[in-house]
């Protein structure tokens, strides 16, 4: 059997439905009714409970359910120097031809938040180590290696924001400059997490799966994008973010078609369109893939 960097051969994505205690506390925090410390206390209790349930049922990796953040994609970008949070996202800032944005607008919903780059990107200290500790500290040190932490992908807002709105062009002349500085911030964050004991990281990226969808590709082309170059740029951004990671750190990539409210998904299409580039160009240890269902297809030749 091939050796792996993690002490098990079955895994799960790690996102759970947030309990009402967490969502209510988040609402109260947003309304200024409770402190950050009170919100953290509620999150910690919920994470301890979900970790206990995973252990009782023999489930690994041990995950926080992402109870430590408001959205699975929040908590990193908006805390880097050079980014500002916009919440909710006005339609004139959103890429209306992008599948997730179009689906939300059709459903009468608005994209909840985005982080827009309006200055030079700089990592000034970890944004996620305290979140990781909420999970890490639920188990003894010898079990830290069984825990998994998740982060959003570097291309998350670049695809969802309207062309030219992701970053200020007075700051970055092109996408390559923008992703270069963003990747440097990722590498610093990953090192900080490693130094705090993390050995298993998962990047959650539904964005890459959208390149399996002809409807999505059509919308991007209508926006003036070269979809092949865009996909290659995103693959490079991923690799640059995880470059130089420690040899004993496992980093996996999860891609899916979206799983919004009541399992609402945003794209369909088999992996055939991206497989040769996806599997040969990306430098991840593990791929967590949705397949063998009507919206994803399988891996038939």
Image: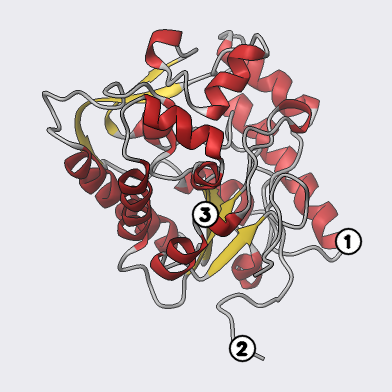
- Quarter of the picture containing the N terminus is bottom right
Horizontal and vertical percent position of residue 43: 67, 35
Q: Residues within 10 Å of mark 1 (few under 14, many from 20)?
A: few
Left or right placement of residue 191 versus residue 205 in this view: left
Residue hosting label 1: 57
Kindly give the residue lying farthest to the bottom in the view shown: 1
Residue 90 visible (yes or no)? no
Looking at the rendered structure, the secondary structure element under dot 2 is loop
Which sits earlier in the primary sequence, circle 1 or circle 2? 2
Looking at the rendered structure, the secondary structure element under dot 1 is loop
Left or right placement of residue 49 versus residue 171 in this view: right
Measure how far apart labels 1 and 2 are at the Cα level.
26 Å
Residue hosting label 2: 2
Residue 79 visible (yes or no)? yes
Measure how far apart labels 1 and 3 are at the Cα level.
38 Å
Residue hosting label 3: 273
Q: Nearer the viewer, residue 189 or 290?
A: 290
């Amino acid at each position: 059997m091939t050796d792996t960097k993690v002490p098990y051969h079955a895994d799960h994505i790690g996102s759970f439905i947030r309990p009402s205690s967490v969502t209510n506390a988040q609402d109260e925090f947003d309304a200024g009714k409770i402190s950050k410390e009170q919100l953290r206390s509620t999150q910690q209790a919920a994470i301890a409970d979900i970790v206990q349930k995973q252990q009782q049922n023999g489930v690994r990796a041990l995950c926080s359910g992402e109870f430590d953040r408001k959205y699975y994609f929040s908590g990193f970008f908006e805390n880097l120097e050079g980014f500002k949070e916009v919440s909710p996202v006005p339609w004139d800032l959103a890429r209306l031809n992008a599948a997730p944005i179009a689906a939300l607008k059709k459903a009468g919903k608005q994209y909840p938040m985005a982080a827009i780059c309006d200055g030079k990107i700089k990592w000034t200290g970890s944004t996620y180590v305290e979140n990781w500790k909420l999970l890490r500290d639920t188990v003894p040190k010898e079990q830290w290696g069984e825990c998994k932490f998740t982060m959003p992908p570097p291309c998350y807002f670049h695809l969802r924001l309207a062309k030219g709105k992701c970053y200020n062009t007075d700051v970055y002349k092109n996408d390559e400059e923008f992703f270069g500085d963003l990747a440097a911030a990722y590498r610093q964050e990953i090192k900080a997490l490693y130094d705090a004991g993390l050995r298993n990281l998962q990047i959650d990226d539904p964005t890459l799966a959208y390149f399996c969808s002809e409807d999505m590709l059509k919308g991007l082309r209508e926006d003036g994008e070269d979809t092949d170059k865009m996909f290659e740029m995103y693959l490079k951004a991923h690799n640059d973010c995880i470059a130089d990671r420690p040899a004993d750190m496992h980093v996996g990539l999860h891609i899916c078609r979206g799983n919004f409210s009541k399992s609402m998904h945003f794209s369909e299409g088999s992996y055939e369109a991206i497989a040769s580039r996806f599997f040969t160009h990306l430098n991840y240890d593990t791929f967590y893939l949705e397949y063998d269902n009507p919206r994803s297809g399988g891996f038939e030749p």
